[in-house]
Amino acid sequence: MKYLAACLAALALAAPAAAQDVTSYTSNANFEDTAFAVESAIVGRGLVVDYTSHVGAMLERTGEDVGSDVELFEAADVFIFCSAVTSRSVMEADPMNIAYCPYGIFVADTGEEVTVGFRTYPEGPMQEVQTLLDEIVQEALAQ
């Protein structure tokens, strides 16, 4: 009985962890306008979008190949980029913060709403990245 209680407690603690690993906001604009605003906010800070991962298109294209007909997104992109200034700062604090680079901001349209967000970073030096990403997203949502 103690073992079962311990397992259930562990599951209860583990379940919300995934939701806590993402910071997200709902956009009032459509996918295209929101994605454009996010990319513009990144570039407007002098940063370069290294890659745009078209996750929604990939999932749509490969669904049948993996035996699924579930449509997860009408559209979903992840903008991948880095900041020399911020990355240097957090990696000088701890070189192992390299594990968090590059950074990504996603825009996803589920058909019900458009969501913008990013991974939540740990306390300490990586909060500098958290702040940067949040400022970019807030700027994009205000456009």
Image: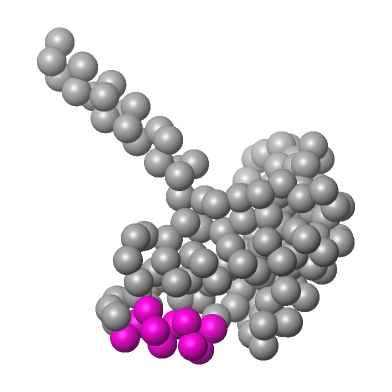
14 relative position to 138: left or right:
left
Q: Is residue 109 one of those drawn in magenta?
A: no
66 relative position to 33: left or right:
left
Dominant secondary structure of the magenta stretch?
Answer: helix
Residue 132 in which image quadrant: bottom right
The magenta segment is 83-92
Q: Considering only vertical position in the picture, is 62 above or below 94?
A: above
Q: Quadrant of the C terminus?
A: bottom right
- For the point 28% across and 78% down, which residue is it? 94
- For the point 58% across and 63% down, which residue is it? 134
Q: Quadrant of the N terminus?
A: top left
Counting from the top left corner in percent of width and height, residue 57 is at 76, 57
Residue 7 in which image quadrant: top left
115 relative position to 91: left or right:
right
- For the point 49% across and 41% down, which residue is it? 19
Counting from the top left corner in percent of width and height, residue 48 is at 66, 85
Question: Please, which residue is most extreme toward the left here?
Answer: 2
Residue 12 in which image quadrant: top left
Residue 24 in sight from this viewpoint: yes
Residue 54 in sight from this viewpoint: no
Q: Considering only vertical position in the picture, is 31 above or below 93?
A: above
How is the rendered protein coloured? Answer: one colour
Query: In the depicted view, which residue is nearer to us: 14 or 135?
Result: 135
- For the point 32% across and 32% down, which residue is it? 13
Query: In the depicted view, which residue is nearer to us: 7 or 70?
Result: 7
Counting from the top left corner in percent of width and height, residue 104 is at 58, 67
Counting from the top left corner in percent of width and height, residue 99 is at 37, 72
Q: Is residue 91 one of those drawn in magenta?
A: yes
Q: Considering only vertical position in the picture, is 28 above or below 112?
A: below
